[in-house]
């Protein structure tokens, strides 16, 4: 039974499963690390809450060669995470980090040669983040343009969605087969060597992950860069502060992460399942219940953040949980931070007269109620 001061609310029942929502920072943060909760559903009847995004389901089916199994079980998803942890190992991140700044500066310098106005999204943030992912996965950087083309083909209305996905999948298969036959001194070869040559399921998992990370895994990071520039250009005082003091870039990046929607497909929330009966702030949560932890709202909790709706690049402290917290913290967070900082530094440093090419009210955010990026970012400089 909930107390009068409960900080967690019932949001109804779906398919026989009781669902709860927590939004206060003091409640959400500890629940992100609560060992009595899991990211995997304990009950088959709640499986639809835990389903992968539709695009990922399509990719899994294509990877399996047309098999009927769409949802991965817990063991398979744990194995996928272990493989991803190899790609995001400390040594690989240290190798790639300096390359991000080089790529950002190169792309920013090239903007001057383009006719204005330009869409910063297509000319800067997307190629930067796609290129970074290529470096992380030991994929030829020169193939980045092909990835972007296939993504556009797969997502454009009335275009060739399946053709683009098939081209992408064929590329991933070819890459894995080549590294299996001709291993190199790179992280992809190391991941393949971690299992026996005859483990075809392992290779399929890697094809799936390459496909997903090259197609989707970098897009939230690119959206963060776009959102950062949009925030700066719609808050001229903060823009001037950053131009006059580049040392504020790290703080600006953290403020963008605090305000952005890190879970756009889930309305700013992460999902956890109760593995046993627990009590949260006086509210009884039964085993099998699903909890929606509202990170977006928690990062605007006025009891933690002064003037919480304001964009303040000098905010200190800034204990946001935009990338999660604890064992399930986003394993891409280091790279995303690096890309955001490098992107801001390069754009602000190279284009001091940067401004919107259209009135601010015409900006279209990808998730309007809880922004995480923009559809287009037309700018002049």
Image (spheres, helix red, strand yellow):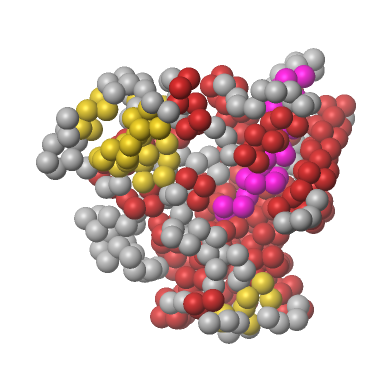
Residue at 65%, 46% in the rendered image: 216
Q: Is residue 207 in the magenta section?
A: yes
Magenta segment range? 200-221
Q: Residue 63: x and y, percent? A: 75, 30
Say which of 94 and 173 sits in front: 173
Q: Residue 228: x and y, percent? A: 51, 66
Q: Is residue 339 visible?
A: no
Question: In the image, 151: left or right of 49?
Answer: right
User: Is residue 330 placed above or below 208 in the rendered structure?
Assistant: below
Q: Residue 347: x and y, percent? A: 60, 72
Quadrant of residue 166 within the rendered picture: top right
Quadrant of the drawing holding the C terminus: bottom right
Question: In the image, 307: left or right of 177?
Answer: left
Question: In the image, 105: left or right of 113?
Answer: left
Say which of 57 and 77 sits in front: 57
Residue at 37%, 39% in the rendered image: 292
Quadrant of residue 27 within the rendered picture: top left
Residue at 83%, 27% in the rendered image: 180
Residue at 41%, 45% in the rendered image: 269
Residue that protrudes farthest toward the left in the picture:
4
Question: In the image, 222: left or right of 149?
Answer: left
């Amino acid at each position: 039974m909930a107390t009068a001061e409960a900080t967690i609310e019932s949001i109804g029942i779906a398919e026989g499963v009781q669902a709860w929502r927590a939004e206060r920072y003091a409640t959400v943060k500890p629940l992100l690390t609560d060992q009595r909760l899991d990211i995997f559903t304990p009950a088959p009847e709640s499986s639809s809450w835990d389903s992968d995004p539709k695009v990922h389901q399509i990719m899994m089916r294509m990877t399996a060669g047309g098999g009927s199994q769409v949802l991965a079980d817990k063991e398979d998803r744990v194995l996928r995470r272990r493989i991803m942890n190899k790609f995001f190992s400390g040594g690989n991140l240290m190798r790639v980090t300096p390359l991000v700044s080089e790529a950002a500066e190169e792309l920013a310098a090239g903007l001057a040669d383009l006719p204005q106005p330009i869409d910063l999204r297509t000319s800067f943030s997307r190629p930067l983040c796609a290129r970074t992912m290529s470096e992380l996965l030991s994929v030829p950087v020169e193939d980045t343009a092909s990835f972007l083309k296939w993504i556009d083909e797969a997502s454009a209305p009335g275009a060739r969605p399946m053709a683009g996905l098939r081209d992408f999948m064929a590329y991933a298969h070819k890459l894995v087969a080549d590294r299996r036959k001709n291993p190199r001194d790179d992280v992809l070869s190391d991941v393949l060597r971690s299992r026996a040559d005859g483990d075809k399921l392992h290779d399929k998992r890697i094809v799936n992950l390459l496909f997903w990370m090259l197609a989707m895994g970098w897009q939230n990071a690119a959206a963060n860069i776009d959102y950062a520039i949009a925030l700066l250009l719609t808050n001229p005082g903060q823009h001037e502060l950053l131009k006059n003091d580049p040392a504020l870039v790290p703080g600006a990046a953290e403020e963008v992460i605090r305000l952005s929607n890190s879970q756009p497909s889930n309305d700013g929330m992460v999902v956890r399942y109760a593995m046993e009966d627990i009590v949260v702030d006086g509210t009884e949560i039964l085993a099998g219940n699903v909890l929606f932890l509202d990170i977006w709202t928690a990062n605007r909790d006025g009891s933690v953040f002064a003037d919480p709706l304001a964009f303040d690049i000098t905010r200190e402290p800034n204990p946001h949980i935009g990338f999660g917290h604890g064992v399930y913290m986003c394993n891409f967070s280091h790279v995303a931070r690096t890309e955001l900082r490098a992107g801001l530094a390069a754009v602000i440093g190279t284009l001091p007269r940067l401004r919107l090419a259209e009135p601010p009210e015409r900006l279209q955010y990808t998730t309007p109620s809880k922004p995480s990026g923009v559809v287009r970012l037309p700018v002049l400089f």
